[in-house]
Amino acid sequence: MVKGIILAIISACAYATLPVLGKMGYEQGLTAIQMLTYRFCFGAATLAVFFLFFRRKALIPTPKLLLKCAGLGLGLYLLQSLSFFTALKYIPASTASLLLYLYPLIVLAESTIFLKIKFRMASLVSVVLIMAGCCLVFYDAFLRQLNLTGILLGLAAPIIFGTCLTMSQVVLKNERPAKVALYMLAFTGAGFAVINQGLGLAELNSAQLSVAIMLGVIPTAIAIGFLYLAMDLIGATYVSLFSSFEPAATLLLAAVLIGEEIVSFQIYGVVLLILGIVVPNLRIIMNKP
């Protein structure tokens, strides 16, 4: 149990580095397309090696799975990633990360409306908490007069991501999550590589290359690899609880590594967002033998 919790926390912290590394990439002169190309290409390659040792079966896809992953990876996932990274050009990493955590609300709404999934009372509490947290994030953005383009792009990211997850519930039903993760990364990376007209590694200086490698390894391969190892040990419900601390980790990392200011509204927003994710799972965990 303890090992699974540690792996889940490491995964959440690794995911939390994504917006911070994105900001660092911009500071080094990289574009959003370049960073996303390196993130997904290096990430897919590293994850493939990881699965070779720990989940070898995840490397063997079916033609049907490849078609599904290509559709989602070259479509919604590509657009969501581009929206998120472009938002980082205009607004703080912490704000972009907090806005991204609107996605559970999007998934809940779309699942209820389109998939006819029963709306539980715990879900209502979750909606209220997440909306309250997001209101604080928006209020903070208003007070600091943050760039409107960045806010809109940051808002588009969770909407697209939530839609992608909702579609995945239908399109990827009964598929193994580890396989899906690997091949969606690979197809998304291929899409960005085409847009970027190749990798262009020879054009990078040492600082840019370091950021590129870290993007592929830390918030991609390590985050995803440890996520599935944790799920094997403690299950998806517990993993989701510990993963909910990701926005708090982003706030801290952004303050320590790139000097972003932490304001009170962000802290309150983080608390409400975490509660909005944790509350729906409490009953499941308390009833778990």
Image (cartoon, helix red, strand yellow):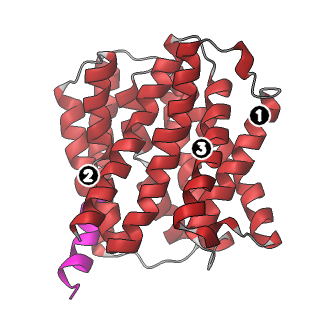
- Residue at horizontal 63 percent and vertical 55 percent from the top: 48
Check disc 2: other Cα within 10 Å, few if <14, some if 14-19, many if 20+: many
**Residue at disc 1, secondary structure:** helix
Question: Circle 3 is placed at which residue position?
Answer: 43
Q: Left or right: 64 with respect to 144?
A: right
Q: Quadrant of residue 177?
A: bottom right
The first of marks 2 and 1 along the sequence is 1
Question: Circle 1 is placed at which residue position?
Answer: 193
Check disc 3: other Cα within 10 Å, few if <14, some if 14-19, many if 20+: many
Give the x, y percent position of residue 264. Answer: 16, 28
Quadrant (top left, top right, bottom left, bottom right) of the C terminus: bottom left
Does 30 appear in magenta? no
Image mark count:
3
Q: Is residue 210 visible?
A: yes
* The magenta segment: 277-289
Circle on res. 274 = 2
Quadrant (top left, top right, bottom left, bottom right) of the N terminus: bottom left
Check disc 1: other Cα within 10 Å, few if <14, some if 14-19, many if 20+: many
Whether residue 219 is situated above or below residue 154 in the rendered picture:
below
Query: In front: mark 3 or mark 1?
Result: 3
> Residue type at mark 1?
Ala
**Residue at disc 3, secondary structure:** helix
- Residue at horizontal 46 percent and vertical 27 percent from the top: 21
> Residue type at mark 3?
Gly
Give the spatial CA distance, label 2 vs label 3: 27 Å
Give the x, y percent position of residue 107. Answer: 49, 60
Query: In front: mark 2 or mark 3?
Result: 3
